[in-house]
Amino acid sequence: MLLKTSITTLATLALLTACGTNPVNPVQDTTPVATATPTKTHTAPTSTALARPVAILSNINGSNLSGDDYGLKLLDVSRLSGTGLAQAFSQAGVTLDPATHSVVLLAMGEQPHGAQARITALQLKEGTLYVQGTASPAPTDGDQTDEITRPFAAVAIPRMVAGTVVRSDIK
C-alpha cells in the first residue's frame, strides 16, 4: 500500500512539474486583486465654527419705549439712560452691571395700539450676534383706536465685546 501511495505521489509531482508548477515552492500570484484610485481630498471651509446660543438673562417687552429710536441694536448698559430700559429692567427686578451685561433692543418705532415685539433666541458666530424673534403688527380686526405706541423687546445678555455685529432674524 505504501508503494502505491508513493507511486501516486511521484506521478502527481511529475505532472505538476511538467506543466511548469513547482509543487515545493508554488509561485505567488502578484496580480493585484483591486487597484486603488486616489480620491480627491476634501478641503474643509476656512471656518467650521458653529453658532453657539447666547443666554438670555432677562427679557422685557413693552409698548412705550421713550424716544424715537427704532430697529435692532446691541447696547452697552451704560448707554441705557433716557430710553426707559434701565427702569423697565429695574421694575422687573433685574440689576444690570455694565461690566458683565449687554442689552439687545428690538424697537418697532411708532405703531398702532396692539403691535408687539419679542426676542426669543440669540446665537453668536464669529463675532456676529444673530437675533431671532417676532415683530407683530397691530391686529386689523376688532376695535381700532388712534392710540400710537412704541412697542419694544429687550433682553439682558452676557456682555458682548465691542465691535460685535448684530444681524436680524426677526419674523
Image (tube, helix red, strand yellow):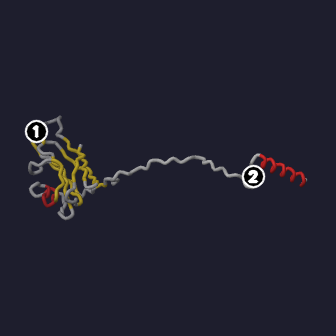
Q: Position of residue 77 (x, y in %)?
A: 16, 60
- Type of amino acid under label 2: Asn
Q: Position of residue 66 (x, y in %)?
A: 9, 51
In terms of depth relative to the viewer, which is nearer, 145 or 8? 8
Q: Position of residue 144 (x, y in %)?
A: 12, 37
Q: CA distance from mark 1 to mark 2?
A: 106 Å
- Type of amino acid under label 1: Thr
Residue at left offset 11%, top offset 54%: 83
Judge left or right: residue 165 versus residue 51: left
| Residue at the disc numbered 1 | 145
Q: Quadrant of the C terminus?
A: top left
* In this view, 100 is above or below 2: below
Residue at left offset 35%, top offset 53%: 48
In terms of depth relative to the viewer, which is nearer, 18 or 159? 18
Q: Earlier in the sequence, mark 1 or mark 2?
A: 2
Under circle 2, the secondary element is loop
